[in-house]
Amino acid sequence: MSDTRVVWFFDFVSPFAYLQWPRVRALAARAPVTLRPVLFAGVLNHLGIKGPAEIPGKRLFTYRLVQWRAQQAKRPLRFPPGHPFNPIAALRLCIAAGTTAEAIDAIFDWIWRDGHAGDTALALAPVAARLGIDDVEAAIAAPEVKAALRTHYEAAVAAGVFGVPTLAVGGELFWGDDAHGLAEAVIDDPTLLESHEMRRLRTLPEAAVRN
């Protein structure tokens, strides 16, 4: 494996991040991976676009795809009571708990394995208690926690992130859990993107542009 810096940008609102997480955790066990919880809605607002769950038709398709992929992976998955939801409380709880693998496990399992709400301090109180945080309201309101989440967002924007989950490998972005295999291939062989056809894609002209 190369020593290229690897960062995983994720949001608990994303079921695809839940599906990718086990492979990211396995990757982190053999090489350093920086884990950055980031507000997906902030990235969407920055780019002026909508998420899949905000587009009629695409929303139901996406949910069905998620459920099917989970079944194929034999990974338990139950949607929370409502989606999309506001994940700020969950993101801040993760940061307050140290953004550890254990904290990420616990929050993802609470929301996506067990199907609980994760949009308020009250909803997250049981999982927070398991993480050793008794006063979840105070923990997620701490100025340093809020500042850290903002810093993660700024790092995502600076890196050019356009969706979650995203693995950043050096200066390259690999969006979505279905791109995980390609990301690992590039980590293992950084020359993979330097073939003639891969390099050609960087300057491929647009043959039509919609106004």
Image: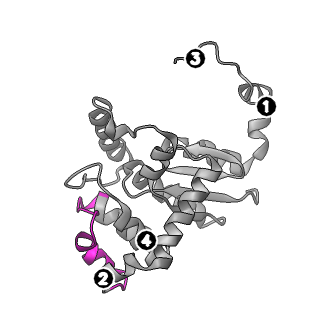
Q: Are marks 3 and 2 in contact (CB under 8 Å)?
A: no
**Is tag 1's residue or tag 2's residue first in the polypeptide sequence?**
2
Q: Would residue 121 appear left or right of 143 to someone viewing this image?
A: left
Instruction: Say what secondary structure mark 1 lies in.
Output: loop
| 126 in the magenta segment | yes
Q: Which quadrant holds the N terminus?
A: bottom right
Q: Which mark is residue 209?
A: 3
Instruction: Check disc 4 and report the residue beneath it.
Output: 94
Q: Which mark is residue 129?
A: 2
Q: Would residue 168 appear left or right of 104 to someone viewing this image?
A: right
Residue 117 screen position, x and y as percent:
24, 62
Q: Nearer the viewer, mark 1 or mark 4?
A: 4
State the separation of the CA atoms marked 1 and 2: 50 Å
Q: Are marks 3 and 4 in contact (CB under 8 Å)?
A: no
| 28 in the magenta segment | no
State the separation of the CA atoms marked 4 and 2: 12 Å
- For the record, the magenta segment spans 112-133
**Is tag 3's residue or tag 2's residue first in the polypeptide sequence?**
2
State the separation of the CA atoms marked 3 and 2: 52 Å
Instruction: Give the image quarter of residue 127.
Output: bottom left
Q: Which mark is residue 182?
A: none
Q: Residues within 10 Å of mark 1 (few under 14, many from 20)?
A: few
> Label 2 amino acid?
Ala
**Is tag 1's residue or tag 4's residue first in the polypeptide sequence?**
4
Residue 184 screen position, x and y as percent:
63, 49
Residue 189 screen position, x and y as percent:
75, 46
Instruction: Give the image quarter of residue 2.
Output: bottom right
State the separation of the CA atoms marked 3 and 4: 41 Å
> Label 4 amino acid?
Cys
Given residues 102 and 90, the one toward you in this image is 90
The reply to whether residue 25 is visible in this rendering is no
